[in-house]
Amino acid sequence: MSLSSKNDKLFDSISEGMKPAAAVPGTKRSLSAPGTAVGMMVGNANESLRTRLADAEAKVDELARDKAEAEARANAKTKEIEGADLALKLDPARVRRSRFADRHPNAFVDAAFKDLCDLIRGTGGNTEAAKVRPIEGDPNFDYELASGHRRHAACLELGLPFKAEVHAYSDQELLKQMRSENSGRKELSGFELGRHYSGLIAEKTFVSGRDLAGKLGVSQSIVQRLLKFADLPDAIIAAFPDPREIRVEWVDRLVEAWQADRPRVEAEISGIVGQAGLRPATIYRRLAGVLSRNKVITREGSVLGRIRLVHGCPAVVLYKDAPDALLQRIQDLVVNWREEEGSGT
């Protein structure tokens, strides 16, 4: 029952009690009866009180409406803030690397990283915000990185504030964020991605390469190729000054060489370790037992063409004006050789 309804009943009962009773001989009329001056004063007072109570109730309703509108505006503002990408300036020492990090340690010491440090030093911090998620139960850190590991390392090394957006990512949301950022980073190598993916499967984050590809939105064929990096022995990886330069098309030959003649490969590794400045392709050929096929075809001092490796496969590169007849003869030679090889002659 509303306040006004209760008031109306109250005043009605008062008015009912003030109605004149039947005349009784020898009795005096009540001073508060409606017909008396006192009764009129009481009636007027009741009407005034009724009006004031009605005004008070209207004021209460108005205040309630104002409060509801204020709460609605506050809730809308909260949702707006929560939905916005708000970047905070964090202490990089309170932010830890993700256990899903995909960067090789060389990515934090190479020339590109030094250039990044110079850039961040000049701007007083990273201008492109990284992404982090809040963590609990770790007294040393407040946040975990989702993306921006190199920017974080640079700010940590330089002692500058770390600009980052805070999101409540689940593990899979965090991995999707890393995948989203990786797709725009050309410098992330196949080796890093391959070892990263194989690590996720080894930790049972995903049950298979197919599962990983489906949930992270990656091509399954690409994932299967990159997972080959997990088959590389650590000794072969260590032979390369920067494993990020190992090409995916080299992996099968390197693994086959290790399985076929491990002592030879180990001897090559020992020799490679003592030599500086070797190109990755040279290291690959020595470990895989592939002779150099890069040759120049010359006659009487004129360069007619070159033989070189293209994506690990030998290719003949002719001079620019090579006639179609020469191309046809090369094609016939390849076909004839294949036929003779197949017949065992």
Image: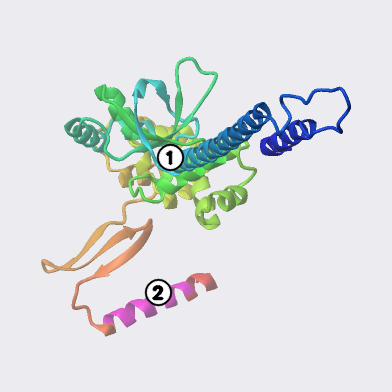
190 or 30, nearer to the observer: 30
- For the question of whether residue 72 can be seen, the reply is yes
Q: Pick the quarter of the image with the N terminus.
A: top right
The image quarter in which residue 86 lies: top left
- Is 336 in the magenta? yes
Q: Residues within 10 Å of mark 2 (few under 14, many from 20)?
A: few
Q: What element carries label 1?
A: helix
**Mark 2 vs mark 1, CA separation in Å:** 68 Å
On residue 334, which mark appears?
2
Q: Is mark 2 on a helix, strand or loop?
A: helix
Q: What stretch is highlighted in magenta?
A: 326-338
N-term-proximal mark, 2 vs 1: 1
* Residue 134: x %, y % from top left: 48, 28
Side (left or right) of 330 relative to 260: left
Residue at 61 percent across and 42 percent down: it is: 206
The residue under label 1 is 81
The image quarter in which residue 77 lies: top left
Does residue 137 lie above or below 36 as drawn?
above
Side (left or right) of 341 relative to 291: right
Amino acid type shown at disc 1: Ile
- Numbered disc in front, either 2 or 1: 1
